[in-house]
Amino acid sequence: MRERDERLGSPGRRTALAAGLDVLVVAVFTLIGRRTHAEPLDPAGWWDTAWPFLAGLAIGWSVVALSSRAWPTRLWHGVTVWIATVFGGMALRDMVGQGTALPFVVVATIFLGVTLVGWRLLVWAVDRRRPEPARPSGTGRGRVHPPMQHTEVGDPLGLEELSGPREATPGRGVVPPADRERIAGELGIRQPRSPEDS
């Protein structure tokens, strides 16, 4: 697999990118929502709309981190993050008396699903097209085994001394018809009767 998990103890560029894009998605969603409803785009108003979804996003990241011991950077992590962001955000909005009308829930579910899973899908597709980086030997998951030592046995059957037919061999290994009876007699092979012998 080309895409690598970034473990909890060692977050890297992919984790920073995932966190930034997820927060950007929620920020854009809430800004579009406020703009659509002709609400002011001031920081306090934006925060009032965004914090429940940002908290849901944090819940999704926590669920993935605790269940897989990795940051939610992979495509399938996006599904967990999406569901937690929508359900967590709606639950918190409901608890503080903000609106959770059905059309809003539907729009939020579709927008956040397309964007939170969508950017991960794009990264996954780009990763699949990129060639696999060469890995130094002895790296990877699981136990690292030392290189296998093989015992040299030489040529116990003497196969190196055997030679096959050469270009100079008449018939290239096929017994000429004139010599067949003589060789069959020497080897004790009984020849089948031909129709001409009857």
Image (cartoon, rainbow, N blue to C red):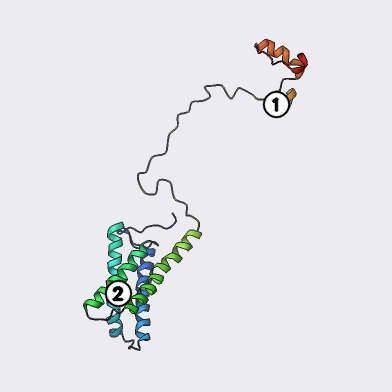
Note whether 170 is above or below 56 in the view shown: above
**Residue under the point 30% across and 65% down:** 61
Q: How crowded is mark 1: few (under 14 residues within 10 Å), some or many (20 or more)?
A: few
* Nearest to N terminus: mark 2 or mark 1: 2
Residue 58 pos. (x, y %) = 28, 69
What residue sits right under mark 1 in the picture?
166
Residue 15 pos. (x, y %) = 36, 64
Note whether 159 is above or below 115 in the view shown: above
Label 2 sits on a secondary structure element that is helix
**Residue under the point 33% across and 66% down:** 81
Label 1 sits on a secondary structure element that is loop
Which disc number belongs to residue 53?
Answer: 2
Left or right, 48 with respect to 160, comes to: left
Q: Are dots 2 and 1 in contact, CB under 8 Å?
A: no
Q: How far apart are marks 2 and 1 (CA)?
A: 80 Å
**Residue under the point 38% across and 68% down:** 17
Note whether 129 is above or below 172 in the view shown: below
Picture quarter containing residue 116? Answer: bottom left
Left or right, 96 with respect to 10, comes to: left
**Residue under the point 38% across and 82% down:** 32
Residue 14 pos. (x, y %) = 39, 64
